[in-house]
Image (tube, coloured by chain):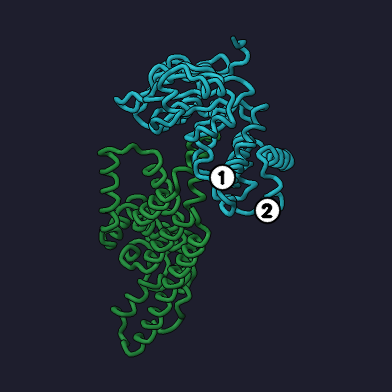
Amino acid sequence: MVATSDIVIEVRDLDFYYGDMKALRGVSLNIKRNQVTALIGPSGCGKSTFLRLLNRMNDLIPGTRVEGQVVFEGKNLYDEDVNPVDIRRRIGMVFQKPNPFPKSIFNNVAYGPRLNGIKDKKRLDELVVRSLKQAAIWEEVKNSLDKSALSLSGGQQQRLCIARALAMAPEVLLMDEPTSALDPIATSRIEELVEALKKDYPVVIVTHNMQQAARVSDDTAFFYMGEMVEMGNTERLFTKPEKQQTEQYITGRFG
Amino acid sequence: MTKGGIFPAIIGTFYLTIGSSLIALPLGVASAIYLSEYAREGWLLRLIRLGIQNLAGVPSVVFGLYGLALFVVFLGFGVSILAGSLTLGFLILPTVIGASEEAFRQVPSTFREASLALGATKFQTICRVVLPSAMPGVLTGSILGIGRAAGETAPIMFTAATFYTKHLPTSPLDQVMALPYHIYVLATSGTHIDQTRPLQYGTVLVLISLVLGINIFAIIIRTRMRRKKTW
């Protein structure tokens, strides 16, 4: 059994609807501190939808509805008095396709801190440098902070996006298939980065790629048809799956 | 009519152009932000869009009469730079709204998503990401509209332009000479046609050059934007 303090996000009986379509049914799981949690499953199984529920990004889609609870730091994120903008400042997100702003490298990373009202040039400098170092991209960009972020390669752009999220000092980092648009070398650099980040940030990563889940994660949750079928220690889940569906998926019989 | 030069008319057209931009740009961009970022799709939005499109097709002389009734008479601005700028501003407003909306549409939604995911409010996202990314497009479309306004005669005939003055305007409530109206005057009211005809074509050349200059400026902005834009 894990102690409650090890749990950073506790999801209880979460249902999610796009209009009349029920996209998630009764999902309950725990996200633990200092760990990487992978969400796997075939396309359309609801894993990305689930991820976006953890920082209320689905609020932006009209006609959606949530039932159940996502408890973060003792508070249900879907309570009436919770401001989604606040939540998104505390829970960072990295997207499938690198999406830097058409601004300089520096201004990309400084974007979040500036939202928080930090104007002091020295503090911004410090934050930007620290975040770029944490995201393992500092050495490549330290002489070109004024250059457009769009001039970077895809893998560099994605690490820049990670730096941009880290500059907010998030309490959790969500990653939605962060390497699916990248080549194998760029992918392995991101994976190393995820490994390094988990001591400071709980990471939840959605991935198509089961090898990736096996390589980077401590816990894995398998989603299928809007349900969370099985969750557990990654090694255990991949070697001794308890549910038949999980076994069929990880052995490649469907998906 | 053959002495004095057209400097007052050039200055008058300059003021009217600047004045109408000052009115149409903020109002047009704000309307476009509402339409593309805030308004919910529905019958009301369709009605507003239809209205704007139709407004763009209204003959300019109608805008002139509207300006006369509203700004000159009802609001008491008199025949003045202010009344003329407002009238011209309204004339190009639909163009500015259309160009801006198109420019906002071309900003990828991933930019908005990235900003919102960092905890920006919708308003912050629009000010810090959407507007800067769309600005070149907004400006190009708007400047083309402004170029059109600079050459319009009918809207300023009743609202701003005067037949002849030696003085340069000293306040927004002054009347001014303006190039398009000056051409009209030269072409229709001269008693010594052989003397005014060269002046008339000279003024036409100046006006055309001015409008061409404005359009080239817009094209330069657009080309630069295309070179910079890689998303």
What shade has chain B been given? green
State if disc 1 and disc 2 touch (CB < 8 Å): no
In which quarter of the view is residue B58 placed? Answer: bottom left
Q: Is residue B191 left or right of residue A206?
A: left
The kind of secondary structure element at disc 1 is: helix
Q: Is residue B57 above or below residue A98?
A: below
Q: Residue at x 49, y 23 (%)?
A: A221
On the image, the x and y values in percent for residue A194 come to 62, 33
Graded by Cα atoms within 10 Å as few (under 14), some (14 to 19) or many (20 or more), the crowding at tag 2 reads few
Which chain's colour is cyan?
A
Residue under mark 1: which chain is it in? A
Q: Alpha-carbon distance for marks 2 and 1? A: 25 Å
Q: Are marks 2 and 1 on the same chain?
A: yes
Reading the image, the residue beneath label 2 is: A144
In this rendered view, identify the residue nearer to me: B160 or A73. Answer: A73
Residue B144 image label: none
Q: Is residue A153 visible?
A: yes
Q: Say which quadrant the N terminus of chain B sits in.
A: bottom left
Reading the image, the residue beneath label 1 is: A184
On the image, the x and y values in percent for residue A169 come to 64, 31
Residue under mark 2: which chain is it in? A
Q: Residue at x 56, y 20 (%)?
A: A233
Graded by Cα atoms within 10 Å as few (under 14), some (14 to 19) or many (20 or more), the crowding at tag 1 reads few
The kind of secondary structure element at disc 2 is: loop
Residue type beneath disc 2: Ser
Residue type beneath disc 1: Pro
Q: Residue at x 48, y 70 (%)?
A: B11
